[in-house]
Image (cartoon, rainbow, N blue to C red):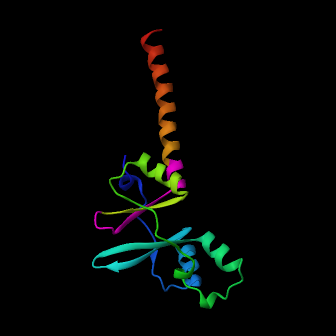
Amino acid sequence: MTAGKYCNRDVVITELDTTVTEAARLMRKHHVGDLVVTKKQGEENLPVGIVTDRDLVVEVLAQEVSLDSVTVKDVMSTDPVTVTEDETLLDTLELMKCRGVRRILVVGSQGGLQGILSADDAVELVTEAMNSLVKLTRREISHEKQQRP
């Protein structure tokens, strides 16, 4: 179970000079709560930050800042937490806990963005695994009743 296997590879990216208004439009259009800010290096999109809907609310709207003067660069979290695709899922979740982040970026061997794994994704994965264990237990009991009446 690796981060690369379970990450969401359909990541919405943007650039440093995107206005916060455009960032909000992108989030709405793609039904996401975050955008990964990247810079192009050759063929790779290197992650340099992440901006969330909460960033827009707390850093812009709550401060009553003029929307025309603010770009993603002004409100994004810099130096995003990343793991490589081959990092185990458990180690990835531990890193998220230790760093206090709800989202972690998954990168390839050259540092290019490959996907994102969120706490919500992890909850869904754990829930599916727990449901499978419950079904296994029920099936085991049923099987035993058939084998040993």
Relative to residue 113, is residue 109 drawn left or right?
A: left
Read off the magenta span: 109-124
Residue in the picture at 47% in, 40% down = 129
Relative to residue 9, is residue 103 drawn left or right?
A: right
Relative to residue 61, is residue 89 drawn left or right?
A: left
Q: Nearer the viewer, residue 137 or 56?
A: 56
69 within the magenta span:
no
The location of residue 76, given as percent across then percent down, is: 54, 75
Q: Nearer the viewer, residue 136 or 52?
A: 52
Relative to residue 55, is residue 91 drawn left or right?
A: left
The location of residue 39, given as percent across then percent down, is: 39, 79
Question: How many numbered badges does the structure rendering display?
Answer: 0
Q: Quadrant of residue 42?
A: bottom left
The location of residue 90, given as percent across then percent down, is: 43, 46
The location of residue 112, given as percent across then percent down, is: 33, 69
Q: Quadrant of residue 7?
A: bottom left
Residue in the picture at 68% in, 85% down = 65
113 within the magenta span:
yes
Residue in the picture at 45% in, 9% down = 148
18 versus 95 height, above or below: below
134 versus 62 height, above or below: above
Q: Residue furthest top?
A: 149
Residue in the picture at 49% in, 43% down = 128
